Amino acid sequence: MQEVNTLWDLLEAAPADRTALIVPDAELRISYGALREQVSAAADLFASAGIRPGERIAMALPNGVPALVCFLAAAIA
């Protein structure tokens, strides 16, 4: 069994085709694979902007998928 130490470990351990998020109001389901892709892309964007591990960032986003993606990306950037 794979050891899980971080949020990213948890995301990586989940099967890509399984549902990670359900947004009932938008009738939207996001798989772990799609979530990983979005989080990785956002983390790459943060890194390209010069954000390094351990630095503090601020985000002003409404509750929802973009906020969760940015939160997870900040945790792994």
Image (cartoon, rainbow, N blue to C red):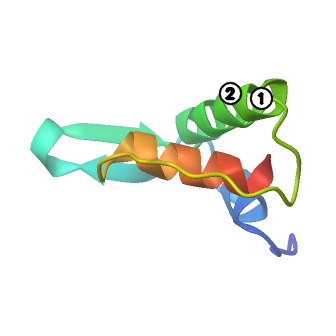
Name the amino acid type tagged 2: Ala
As helix, strand or loop, the secondary structure at mark 1 comes to helix
Residue at the spot 78% in from the left edge and 69% down from the top edge: 6
Q: Position of residue 67 (x, y in %)?
A: 43, 48
Is 13 displayed left or right of 63 in the figure? right
Q: Position of residue 70 (x, y in %)?
A: 56, 45
Question: Is 53 rendered above or below residue 49?
Answer: below
Q: Position of residue 1 (x, y in %)?
A: 86, 74
Please give the residue where the numbered disc 1 appears in the rendered image: 44
Name the amino acid type tagged 1: Asp
Residue at the spot 80% in from the left edge and 46% down from the top edge: 77
For this rendering, which residue is in front, 6 or 29? 6
For this rendering, which residue is in front, 50 or 74? 50
Is 66 displayed left or right of 74 in the figure? left
Residue 12 visible within the image: yes
Question: Is 26 rendered above or below residue 74?
Answer: above
Q: Position of residue 30 (x, y in %)?
A: 41, 40
> Mark 2 to mark 1: distance in Å?
5 Å
* The label number, if any, that marks residue 34 in the structure image: none
Question: Is 73 rendered above or below residue 50?
Answer: below
Question: In the rendered image, which quarter is residue 51 located in?
Answer: top right
As helix, strand or loop, the secondary structure at mark 2 comes to helix
Please give the residue where the numbered disc 2 appears in the rendered image: 41
The local crowd at label 2, few if under 14, some if 14 to 19, many if 20 or more residues have their Cα within 10 Å, is some
Residue at the spot 65% in from the left edge and 32% down from the top edge: 42
Q: Cβ–Cβ below 8 Å for labels 2 and 1?
A: yes
Is 23 displayed left or right of 10 in the figure? left
